[in-house]
């Protein structure tokens, strides 16, 4: 009877968090034999998340990141980056299983729910090698139905050169409208956090039990935790001080957790693919 109560509680917790995170896709945890108490204590944390929220960041205006857009269905679901007057780069897991007619792009505003322009999408080009199991090749292109005109609130981000490399410790800026983990910090207004790039081998070691990371991925964050991206920021930009789009918010374990930096899709690896499909 006691076991049944524990199982019922687990189901309640699952339903509760599913409702909060809107069905965030999770990467399976390592298989372990656990007691019922252990499962209750670690059920949520033991699953890496496949989305981002700005944790430990600060408010910015859209003019500070005019490349930032909001990908929406009935509301905000992911971020994205303008790379031309008609093309947007986001994460493949944001568009997985969706059709262009179901999606909208809001741009030119600091608030995802109002102002700016709400535009229709003509086409989704999802990377053909996207792997939902390990989130490899997490790239997707969105073509707007009609090109936009750039202004101070709408500008294309600079793309890296093919196979361009970046230095460990280099500061990058991650922005979005994701959950902040703080009731005093509204997610309705655009936020940004600064994080350093993490050594590739070190990041791979940290995620070894989750299958590690691939060369299409790049990591950023503080090993002591406290600052990160999470639910709602996926697909959004990670930009260095030179204004180059280094990464696309992709996945990670928890949010701003010690020893687990955020994992981003490395844009330089997909440079040829982006040019082939968008001409950019």
Image (cartoon, rainbow, N blue to C red):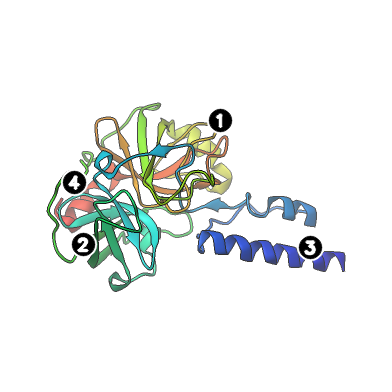
> Which residue is the site of mark 2?
143
Tell me whether the residue at label 4 lies in contact with that at label 1, contact meaning CB atoms closer than 8 angstroms.
no
Under circle 4, the secondary element is loop
Q: Is residue 106 left or right of residue 59?
A: left
Q: Residue 224 carries which label?
A: 1
Q: In this view, does 253 lie to the left or right of 166?
A: right
Tell me whether the residue at label 1 lies in contact with that at label 3, contact meaning CB atoms closer than 8 angstroms.
no
Visible residue check, residue 222: yes
The tally of labels here is 4
Q: Please rate how many residues cluster around mark 2, counting C-alpha atoms within 10 Å: few if below 14, some from 14 to 19, many from 20.
A: many
Depth check: give the residue in front, 274 or 129. Answer: 274
Under circle 2, the secondary element is strand
Q: Which of marks 3 and 4 is in front?
A: 4
Q: Residue 140 carries which label?
A: none
The quarter of the rendered structure image containing the N terminus is bottom right
Q: Which mark is residue 155?
A: 4
Look at the picture and state if 215 lies above or below 139. Answer: above
Rounded to the nearest angstrom, the CA distance separating label 1 from label 2 is: 39 Å
Q: Which label's residue is closer to the chain start, 1 or 3?
A: 3
Q: Which label's residue is closer to the chain start, 2 or 4?
A: 2
Q: Which label's residue is closer to the chain start, 2 or 3?
A: 3
Rounded to the nearest angstrom, the CA distance separating label 1 from label 3 is: 33 Å
Pinpoint residue 202: horizontal percent, then vertical percent. Answer: 49, 32
Rounded to the nearest angstrom, the CA distance separating label 2 from label 3 is: 48 Å
Under circle 1, the secondary element is loop
Rounded to the nearest angstrom, the CA distance separating label 4 from label 1 is: 34 Å
């Amino acid at each position: 009877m006691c076991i049944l109560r524990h199982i019922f509680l687990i189901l309640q917790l699952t339903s509760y968090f599913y409702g909060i995170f809107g069905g965030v896709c999770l990467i399976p945890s390592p298989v372990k034999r656990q007691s019922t108490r252990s499962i209750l204590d670690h059920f949520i944390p033991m699953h890496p998340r496949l989305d981002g929220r700005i944790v430990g960041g600060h408010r910015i205006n859209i003019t500070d990141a005019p490349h930032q857009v909001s990908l929406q269905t009935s509301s905000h679901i992911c971020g994205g980056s303008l790379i031309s007057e008609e093309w947007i780069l986001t994460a493949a897991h944001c568009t997985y299983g969706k059709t262009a007619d179901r999606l909208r792009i809001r741009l030119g505003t600091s608030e995802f729910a109002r102002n700016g322009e709400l535009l229709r999408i003509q086409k989704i080009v999802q990377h053909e090698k996207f792997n939902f199991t390990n989130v490899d090749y997490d790239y997707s292109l969105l073509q707007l139905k009609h090109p936009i005109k750039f202004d101070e609130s709408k500008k294309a981000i600079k793309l890296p050169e093919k196979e361009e490399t970046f230095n460990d410790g280099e500061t990058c800026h991650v922005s979005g409208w994701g959950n902040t983990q703080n009731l005093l910090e509204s997610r309705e207004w655009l936020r940004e956090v600064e994080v350093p790039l993490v050594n590739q081998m070190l990041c791979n070691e940290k995620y070894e039990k989750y299958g590690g990371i691939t060369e299409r991925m790049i990591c950023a964050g503080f090993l002591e935790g406290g600052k990160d991206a999470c639910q709602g920021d996926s697909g959004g930009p990670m930009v260095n001080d030179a204004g180059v789009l280094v990464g696309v918010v992709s996945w990670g374990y928890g949010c701003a957790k010690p020893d687990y930096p955020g994992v981003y899709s490395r844009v330089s690896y997909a440079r040829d693919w982006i040019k082939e499909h968008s001409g950019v």
